[in-house]
Image (cartoon, grey):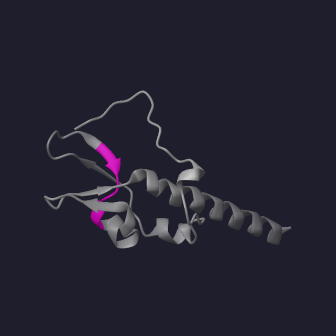
Amino acid sequence: GTLTVTNLNSQSDASLKGNVETVTNAVNTVQQLKGVSFNWLGTGSKSYGVIAQDVEKVIPEIVSTDSNGIKAVNYQALSAFLIESIKELKAEIESLKQQIK
């Protein structure tokens, strides 16, 4: 189904978390994922995302499977890899700029 909300906030306070570590090797992880376009079989609606089985091979912790064997991806968790991969790429760009000078 479709859930439409005006705003969705997820608890993320530091006081609720333990063993906090920055995601590393994020670019390599993201490179192993594939963004896809597709049509939902039930409605034919066009959408975009990832395939859970593909993500499970790379980051199994963010994929869940229900009692019918249907897999779901925690897209919020995926954002940590996207954020850190951008930062890694930015650092690489800056390093290359320094080498050119």
Residue 53 occupies quadrant? bottom left
Above or below residue 39? Residue 56 is below
- Closer to us: 8 or 100: 8
The C terminus, quarter of image: bottom right
Specify the farthest residue to the top.
6
Residue appearing at x 39%, y 71% in the figure:
58
Residue appearing at x 15%, y 59% in the figure:
67
Residue 26 % position (x, y): 54, 67
Residue appearing at x 39%, y 57% in the figure:
35
User: Going by the image, does 21 lie left or right of 64?
Assistant: right
Residue 94 % position (x, y): 75, 63
- Closer to us: 99 or 11: 11
Above or below residue 28? Residue 4 is above
User: Going by the image, does 38 lie left or right of 82?
Assistant: left
- Closer to us: 3 or 89: 3
Residue appearing at x 56%, y 72% in the figure:
25
Residue 51 % position (x, y): 30, 59
Specify the farthest residue to the front.
15
Residue 41 % position (x, y): 15, 47
Specify whether residue 52 is painted magenta.
Answer: yes
Q: How many marks?
A: 0
What is the magenta range?
47-53
Specify whether residue 76 is painted magenta.
Answer: no
The N terminus, quarter of image: top left
Residue 8 occupies quadrant? top left
- Closer to us: 51 or 81: 81
User: Going by the image, does 8 lie left or right of 36?
Assistant: right
Specify the farthest residue to the right.
101
